[in-house]
Amino acid sequence: VAFGVAGTGVAPIRAIFESEEAMAAVKGSGRTAQLFYGAQDLDDLAFRERFECWEQSGVQIVPVLSRASDSFDGQKGYVQDALAKEGVLNTPSSSVIVLCGGKEMAESIKEFAASAGIPEDRILTNF
């Protein structure tokens, strides 16, 4: 399961990550959970104090910074590009994408997902 979020879009996703039932369903399906979280810089990432807890529940957190400092060694740019670059969609028929945040990001990821063969009903958005 790939989560693509930008800015305040992380707030509703937090509820999923902190729900024992939701995370048990992800783990029980044999899937992994990856959060591609976009912001301008590290200081803009909300809930950083919760990241360790989310990681312990099985979520891989991938910060994606559009205005990262030169010392930042993570993903730079935009969520849609990072998600495509990471190749998380290796099994299109069983991939699930949850998008929450900017409409432009979501539309770009939906286009990418369609070209990768992910069925439209496996892409969930907040709008």
Image (spheres, rainbow, N blue to C red):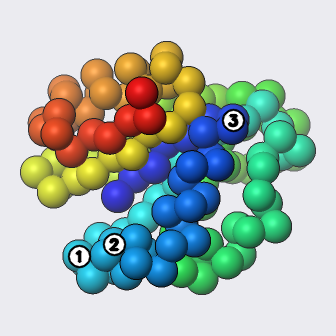
Contact, CB < 8 Å: mark 2 with mark 3?
no
Q: Which residue is labeled 2 in the image?
A: 26
- CA distance separating discs 1 and 3: 28 Å
- CA distance separating discs 1 and 2: 5 Å
Q: Which residue is labeled 1 in the image?
A: 29
Q: Which residue is labeled 3 in the image?
A: 7
Work out whether mark 2 precedes mark 3 in sequence or the reverse, and give the earlier one.
3
Residue 95 point in image, percent of width and height:
23, 53
Q: Residues within 10 Å of mark 1 (few under 14, many from 20)?
A: few
Residue 53 point in image, percent of width and height:
67, 78
**Residue shown at 38%/20% (left/top)?**
107
The amino acid on which the numbered mark 2 sits, given as a three-letter code, is Val
Tally the numbered discs: 3
Residues 86 and 64: in front is 64
The amino acid on which the numbered mark 1 sits, given as a three-letter code, is Ser
Residue 67 vertical position relative to residue 58 in the rendered view, above or below: above
**Residue shown at 74%/69% (left/top)?**
50
The amino acid on which the numbered mark 3 sits, given as a three-letter code, is Gly
Q: Residues within 10 Å of mark 2 (few under 14, many from 20)?
A: some
| Residue 71 seen | yes
Work out whether mark 1 precedes mark 3 in sequence or the reverse, and give the earlier one.
3
